[in-house]
Amino acid sequence: MMLVFVLRHTVKTDTMAPPCGGERPLWPTPTVNQCQSNMATRWGICSAGKISNDFTVALKTLPPGDHQVVAVAARKLENAQEFAKKHSIPRAYGGYEALARDPDIDVVYIGVIHPYHLSTCLLFMNAKKNVLCEKPLAMNAKEAKQILASAKENDVFFMEAVWTRFFPVSVEIRRLLAQGEIGEVKMVRSEFGMPLHGVPRVMQKELGAGTMLDLGVYCLQLTCMVYNGEKPESIHATGTFMETGVDDIDVVTLKYSNNRLAVFICRSDIELPNEAVIVGTKGTIRIPGHIWCPTSLVVNGKETKYPVPEPYLPINFINSTGMRYEAEAVRQCLLKGLKESAVMSHADSLLLAEVEDEVRRQIGVVYSQDSQ
Ligand SMILES: NC(=O)C1=CN([C@@H]2O[C@H](COP(=O)(O)OP(=O)(O)OC[C@H]3O[C@@H](n4cnc5c(N)ncnc54)[C@H](OP(=O)(O)O)[C@@H]3O)[C@@H](O)[C@H]2O)C=CC1
Ligand SMILES: O=C(O)[C@H](O)[C@H](O)[C@H](O)CO
């Protein structure tokens, strides 16, 4: 007698994991995960803005059997419809609530400006949606804690979209550090400068402006990644202001135990080389440029390149197809039933938010959200 298994999806794996604890089956018997792994991760996009455009383009560089964009929501229906038409997305919603109610969404990507990260994260997680929210997670640590608490209360997956951490360059840096390639790290020096004074969300406080939250977060995330999520023993920050009352240039020093240091400069008025160097007792790792979306790494003088795919549509930001790496990481977490990523964990996000708060406090930048 031949047993025929009618599978919901063609199992595309060629190695069958035996049932939990059982011997290998006589025929392919996919586990739930293998069935799920043959179902595309269904994305909802919150906002029809610039980074949402780029994230959607990045998703299209991944196998369509793994990632599908099912819906987009914007404050105005016509903006969602225009976005949906441009990206061939089947559903468009006017208002984010409709997206939160859509039962066919596995995970929502939040691409609104940072003052609206808290409200949109809560909206979707209270609707039991998994969430990938753009950086910076929130306007301050208080908001960040609210978001992370909501993820736990709702038992959903949540990750701050610190896309840099998922680039092949970052994966290689972590591998080299883990195997002691450069010995004990004693210094991380980084910088991120871009001429952004014409960008409203970089200038206007009510839109979340301020260099630390927009650019400094990248220098800080690299530092925290290299120092494995360790809290600095001390922070020293100084800076200058834009005429709009937010930080323009930030110079930050972080001290760690055993004379380990980190220094970064971020500024929104001019372009810098945007490189970083990680100095250890036995060698040096250098990111020669684009530290927020790196495609090249120099290890003890030897350079290796890690190009990102070309976009199929115009993108707004450099190397944005590199957001594919974080998207795939989210998919893998969901397939494993994880509620957070070990690469960009909730503790990592909280550390970033707390250091950002302290830098702003020392420089003297206060947002309305700080007193709510
Ligand atoms: N990872 C990366 O490489 C990058 C990340 N980012 C992050 O992404 C976020 C968005 O940046 P970006 O796409 O450049 O921003 P946009 O200026 O394109 O705005 C994004 C969306 O935010 C909403 N929005 C904008 N202004 C307002 C307002 N005044 N009131 C209410 N909602 C508003 C709109 O949503 P709607 O469409 O619904 O109207 C808009 O489409 C930021 O948090 C930024 O830090 C930005 C650039 C690069
Ligand atoms: O995340 C980023 O890269 C920042 O939002 C910058 O403002 C953007 O890339 C500017 O080009």
Image (spheres, grey):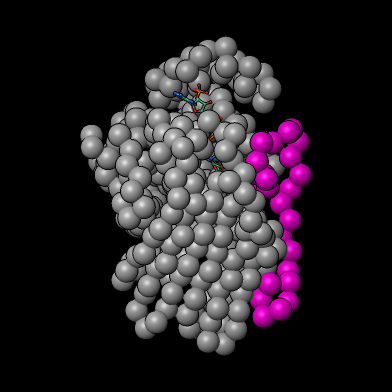
Residue 34 located left or right of residue 270: left
* Front residue (pair 59, 295): 295
Q: Is residue 168 visible?
A: no
Q: Nearer the viewer, residue 288 or 84?
A: 288
Q: Which residues are magenta?
A: 298-322
Q: Residue at x 66, y 59 (%)?
A: 273
Residue drawn at (43%, 54%), measured in percent from left and top? 239
Q: Is residue 315 magenta?
A: yes
Q: Is residue 190 above or below residue 39?
A: below
Does the magenta portion include 154?
Answer: no
Residue 263 percent location from the top left of the image = 48, 67
Q: Main secondary structure of the magenta part?
A: loop
The x and y percentages for residue 253 are 42, 67
Residue at the extreme bottom of the image, as rendered: 282
The answer to whether residue 116 is seen in the rendering is: yes
Question: Is residue 192 left or right of 233 when viewed as pictured?
Answer: right
Residue furthest toward the front? Answer: 243
Q: Residue at x 42, y 78 (%)?
A: 260
Horizontal and vertical percent for residue 139? 36, 41
Can you say which quadrant of the picture contains the C terminus?
Answer: top left
Tell me the quadrant of the picture where the N terminus can be found: top right
Q: Vertical placement of 260 versus 65: above or below? A: below
Residue 121, horizontal then vertical, whole percent = 37, 34
Residue nearest the observer in this picture, 290 or 60: 290
